[in-house]
Amino acid sequence: MKALRIKFKFLKKLPKIGKVLFWFLTGASLGLFLFIGFAFIIFQSLHKNAIYPGVSVNGIDFGGKTEKQIKEFFAKKNEKIQDTKFVFISEAATATVSAKEINFGYDEDLLSKQAFSLGRSNDVVTNISLIFQAYVNGLNLPSAYHYSDTKLISSLSPTIEKLHIDPVDSLFTFQNGRVSVFKPSKDGQTVDTEKLKSQTSSKFLTVVSSSKPQILAIEIPVKVLKPKITTDKANNLGIKELLASGTSLFQHSITNRIYNISLAATRLNGILVAPNEVFSFGKALGDISAFTGYLQAYVIQNGKTVLGDGGGVCQVSTTFFRALLNAGLPIIERTAHAYRVGYYEQDSPPGLDATVFVPSVDLKFKNDTGNYILIQTLIDPNVLRLTFELYGTKDGREVVIGKPVVSNESPPPPDIYQDDPTLPKGQVKQVDFAAWGAKVYFTRQVTKNGKVIISDRFDSDFRPWQAVYLRGTKE
């Protein structure tokens, strides 16, 4: 019973103890709060114009420093950065821009303000928390940089303009069974300025991490500009892209020969070859004579080089033959020249030629691509170069042409002089040119989807050729 009475008395005193404890804790908390607040006010007063202890920028402790000191510190670093060079490189142009020109460097204003404002917001609790964290563990602010992308693009504007190429819309006019006007579409290009800015800014850490000015190379990024009208949209014949081309030079040709080459090439320009059609060069060109506009130039006839109508047409057939080879098209008929002609070896090894003599000797190929093929000819008058371009739809065929093998070479016979009563006495005129004889062959293999679809060999048996001079006897 006595124990029960003691327990009862304790329970009656418990509320009083709780109240005392409550007021004690409240007072202690209030006192602690006031102490912390008073201490915080004193701490703030002591660091009124200084960065709080433990605050770092990019790993550098600025505790106790003023906002002005931080700004001066990074401004001094920027002086070293000014001479850093950014070299922008492309295949067509190179440009160099300094860090000073694009105003690149540490953002001293932002960094000094960020460091100083840490622990000085309107939220007292947050301020105390940040100051405590900085004091105990430290708070590190990342670097901030500034640069003017406007100045960057402005400095590079000449290079950007140089690299800019407008796309070309296709032009395709079909009249009377052939293409009278053809201009293939071409992609354009322009500098990708957004990517350029990004690539430039990605170099900033490298710049600021170095103790001395750097020279940094940046490849200028370009993006493709597509034409509004592509070649395949301009026609419905399956002519989409360039299949292949062939070229030859005809430098040192006489005026009449140059004229004949241009005439024959023009008459083949714009011809469409239908799918599965066997194309005849001779048939497409038609009559080669003075009646059809050709002039007299040297031709090989009956084993001699003589003046004849259309001299130079074989330059056209030779160039066309090279385009057919490169396109991997089946060649049905081809005949080599009787001797090596110097024109055809100006930009090519021997054996890559094809002669025509309408109507007996022809050059033929078959269009096995499944789509139309458009023949285009180009003549560069500055270097006297003829080009054939074949347009159509690529079907994945790949072409490997072997290097011509030359054997059984034989020197030309001695020069021969012939009297010519039509030339003034004492005048000598060369009408045929010496050439070495040789046997030449080369191979070609055309594959499609890993399977060989054409494997052929082209042979040439060039006779040795003597130089012939006419010697005037006319009094």
Image (cartoon, grey):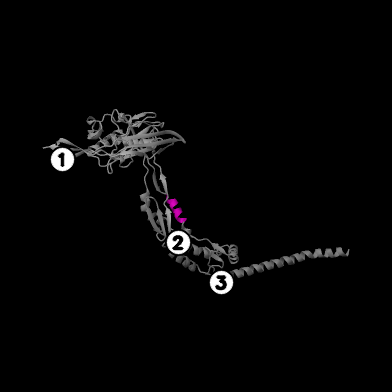
Residue 105 is labelled as: 2
Mark closest to the chain's N terminus, 3 or 2: 3
Find residue 275 and report its horizontal and vertical position in percent: 39, 29
Q: Residue furthest right?
A: 1
Q: Is residue 246 magenta?
A: no
Separation of marks 3 and 1 at Cα, in angstroms:
113 Å
Point out the stretch of residues depicted in magenta: 192-202
Front tag of 3 and 1: 1
Amino acid at circle 3:
Leu
Indicate whether 132 appears above or below 339. Answer: below
Indicate whether 435 appears above or below 95. Answer: above
Q: Image quarter for residue 16?
A: bottom right
Front tag of 1 and 2: 1
* Circle 3 Cα neighbour tier, 10 Å, few/some/many (<14 / 14–19 / ≥20): few
Who's the residue at 37% across and 52% down the image? 93
Amino acid at circle 2:
Gly
Q: Closer to the camera, 123 or 420?
A: 420
Q: Pointers 3 and 1 in contact (CB under 8 A)?
A: no
Separation of marks 3 and 2 at Cα, in angstroms:
32 Å
Find residue 456 and report its horizontal and vertical position in percent: 40, 33
Q: Is residue 375 visible?
A: no
Find residue 253 and report its horizontal and vertical position in percent: 25, 40
Amino acid at circle 1:
Gln
* Circle 2 Cα neighbour tier, 10 Å, few/some/many (<14 / 14–19 / ≥20): many
Q: Pointers 3 and 2 in contact (CB under 8 A)?
A: no
Secondary element type, mark 2: strand
Who's the residue at 45% across and 51% down the image? 195
Secondary element type, mark 3: helix
Q: Is residue 391 left or right of residue 16?
A: left
Residue 46 is labelled as: 3
Residue 427 is labelled as: 1
